[in-house]
Amino acid sequence: MLPILLFFGCSRQILVSSDYDKTADFNAYKTFAWAEEQEAPGKSNPMFDNEMNRKRIKDAIEQEMGVLGFNKSDSDPDLLIDFHITIDQKVNYMVHDFEPVGFSYWPDYDVSAYTYKKGALIIHLVDSKKEQLVWQGIGSKTLDDVPPRNVEERIQKGVKAILAQFPVNKK
């Protein structure tokens, strides 16, 4: 999703999940602003996590918050938003069986390992009065080594999929 949402275009499926404070009254929230302290782009994956893509993510989040009926307000907002990008190197193993079962006493197989990148975009919404996290949405995807085309469109789709999990009806 994005730096990270860029990835959302690389493999077939975006895995989306969310969690929220069951005691929060989400219908009482009307306005939002960006948290003052935002994470800086990471240096380990500049192809995905860079200032340009972070701006695209912010724009997509603002657009979707508008769709959900929220107004941006820099003075006394109900919610503060921040987001985080993670890109992790993963290892997976494949077993290649060369002998059909029953033809040998000893199995004849080979194990090979391959690495891949997994990216995630995590969006946090914080109640500005209580200074408590009230909602978290996560989108993750396996990433290719080459950034996809139509980056802005892919980021918008990824952010939309994540914020579709927000527990309030569109207004």
Image (cartoon, rainbow, N blue to C red):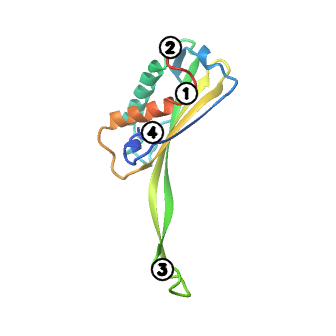
- SS category of the residue bearing label 2: loop
The mark that comes first in sequence, 1 or 4, is: 4
Could one spot residue 37 in this view of the protein?
no
Q: Nearer the viewer, mark 2 or mark 4?
A: 2
The residue indicated by pointer 1 is 166
Residue drawn where x is 44% and y is 20% of the image? 67
Residue 157 image position (x, y, % from top left): 40, 33
Q: Looking at numbered disc 1 in the image, what kind of residue is underneath it?
A: Phe
According to the picture, the residue beneath numbered tag 4 turns out to be 41
Label 2 packing within 10 angstroms: few (<14), some (14-19), many (20+): some
Cα–Cα span, label 2 and label 4: 25 Å
Q: Residues within 10 Å of mark 4 (few under 14, many from 20)?
A: some
**Which callout, 1 or 3, points at the residue further toward the start of the chain?**
3
Tell me if label 3 and label 4 are in contact, CB under 8 Å: no
Tell me if 66 is positioned left or right of 79 in this view: left
Give the residue displayed 36% in from the left and 53% down from the top.
145
Residue 80 visible at all: yes
Nearer to us: label 2 or label 3: 3
Q: Which residue is mark 2?
A: 73
Taking the view exactly as shown, the residue that stands out farthest to the bottom is 105
Label number found at residue 100: 3
Q: Nearer the viewer, mark 1 or mark 2?
A: 1
Q: Is residue 166 left or right of residue 66?
A: right
Q: Nearer the viewer, mark 1 or mark 3?
A: 3
Q: Nearer the viewer, residue 112 or 82?
A: 112
